[in-house]
Amino acid sequence: MKEIYYKIGEVSEMLNLEPYTLRYLESSLKLKIKRDERGERLYTDSDLDTLRLILQLKNEKGLNTTAIKLALENLNEANNNENNTPQVYNAADFVEIVNVARNIMQQNDEILAQNKVMQQKLQALKDAQQKMDNENSARWDELLGVLRAETAEKKSNWLAKLMRNK
């Protein structure tokens, strides 16, 4: 059975997308779209299904391009491990991948929150250290002042005794 190919304009109309959006998705998600001898894109039904699922993940599930790319890469790795024949992605695969991607994103958010808390604690420690350094410096200044005063007093007492003895 001969496979049907669609040009970018046809796919653009079918999916109600601008051609530049299709080119962006191909580039950012590293989609393998077949090209003819003139370099024009030739989309298959499988490509259309993949694009529909990408749009569903983006619009209905709220995933960003990075999460969708991760999901596609994981799905491609799983398919490459099973066999080397191209496979049409089904919604169940994408739902599973979306759930994994969401879990990863949630873990990343938790790690970022923990990182923020640790940075706040580190800043609090730095502030406490600076306060202690300032207090220690003030104490040293006070101690040196007392020692200078005592030394000056001893010198003056010594001079006073010397003067009295004369």
Image: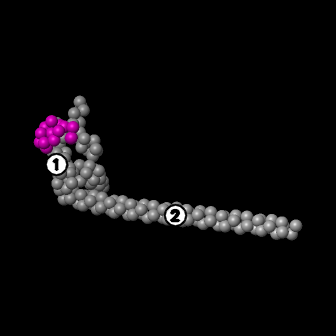
Q: Nearer the viewer, residue 117 or 49?
A: 117
Q: Nearer the viewer, residue 87 or 20?
A: 20
Which image quarter holds the N terminus?
Answer: top left
Name which residue lies at 17% across and 54% down: 60
* 15 magenta-colored: yes
Q: Nearer the viewer, residue 109 or 103?
A: 109
From mark 2 to mark 1, how far is it between C-alphas?
60 Å
Q: Secondary structure at mark 2?
A: helix
Does the rendering let one see residue 45? Answer: yes
Does the rendering let one see residue 4? Answer: no
Left or right position of 22 against 117: left
- The residue identified by callout 2 is 131
Q: Secondary structure at mark 1?
A: helix
Dividing the picture into quadrants, the one containing residue 137 is: bottom right
Which image quarter holds the C terminus?
Answer: bottom right
Left or right position of 147 against 113: right
Name which residue lies at 13% across and 37% down: 10
Dots 2 and 1: beta carbons under 8 Å?
no
Dividing the picture into quadrants, the one containing residue 16 is: top left
Percent position (x, y) of residue 11? 15, 40
Question: Which callout, 2 or 1, points at the residue further toward the start of the chain?
Answer: 1
Specify start and end residues of the magenta stretch as a single range.
8-22
Between label 2 and label 1, give the one nearer the viewer.
Answer: 2
Q: What colour scheme has been applied to the protein in the rendered image?
A: one colour
Amino acid carrying label 1: it is Arg
Give the numbered dot on residue 158.
none
Vertical position of residue 105 compared to residue 40: above or below: below
Name which residue lies at 26% across and 59% down: 102
Vertical position of residue 22 compared to residue 140: above or below: above
- The residue identified by callout 1 is 52
